[in-house]
Image (cartoon, rainbow, N blue to C red):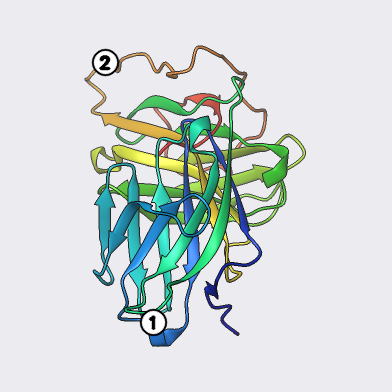
Amino acid sequence: MDICPLLVGGGESERVTGYSGGGVLIKCRYERRYTLNPKYLCTGPWPCMTKPIWTDAKNEWINSGRFSLFDDTRAAQFWVMIRELTVEDSGTYQCGVHKYLVIDVYTPVELKVEEDQDYTTSVSVTGHVGGSVNISCKYPQSHRSDPKFLCRRVGTADCTYKTSVKESRRWINEGKLSLHDDRAKQIFTVSFNRLTEGDSGEYWCGAESNWTSDHGYKAFITQINLRVTSPDVLPQSSTPISSSTTQPTTSSPPETRSSPLSTTGINILYFSF
């Protein structure tokens, strides 16, 4: 695959859409001769002076406030994560590679953060050991044809993929997980089966936008806080952080051999990180 390098002196902007309360992961490719150079994200048109994050570290997440950066030297690309988005984050950014004594190379990024009160950014769900829970994440029309994913957050920035779905109205089974994307209704459903206490944690529903291209991004939509308890522990009621309420979807995951002790169906919406 040809690599589209970062541009010297600017060029056509990469357009990224995020959602208030959510997060985005932006991909920035560079030429392999810049593998050892420091990488950064700065705000505003070039030459921008404010750099929310700058690092010469390689192949590890570096965190600075709501910003994180991972320089993948093997793939000749770096990723920038921006969490807890607000409308005020909208604007121009630059994915930059620092060059000593000469002008840096960079790619402009136009970030637009949308706010919609219909979207729920976070939900808490309680299930029982051996049981199942169903969670439905609603997404905007702009992501209807994009692949949807579920990941589990590990650390500040890393969200490890559990599985993804690229087709509409077809259940995808991956171990204890079942995923279904109804593009007509714009609802992505996740079923956790045969729960164990080790499944407790923070998960995210999200969508990929041109992620396989040289300059793609991921939108993190709904934060799922899953708590799995023993059958003799009475769970607390699951209440989304948002005051808005939605109705459960009518689609059902494939039958599993386990007999769920508790099933929760909640329509939620976008990703904070």
Q: The N terminus lies in which quarter of the figure?
A: bottom right
Residue that appears at 44% across and 28% down: 122
Q: Is residue 31 above or below residue 144?
A: below
Label 2 SS: loop
- Residue 67 percent coordinates (x, y): 34, 48
Residue 113 visible in rendering: yes
Label at residue 234:
2
Q: Is residue 224 above or below residue 149?
A: above
Question: Is 97 left, or right, of 189 in this rendering?
Answer: left
Which of pointers 1 and 2 lies earlier in the amino acid sequence?
1
Quadrant in the rendering for residue 136: top right
Label 1 SS: helix
Dot 2 crowding, Cα within 10 Å, few <14, some 14–19, many 20+: few
- Residue 123 percent coordinates (x, y): 43, 26
Quadrant in the rendering for residue 236: top left
Choose between 53 and 1: the one closer to the eye: 53
Q: Which residue is mark 1?
A: 34
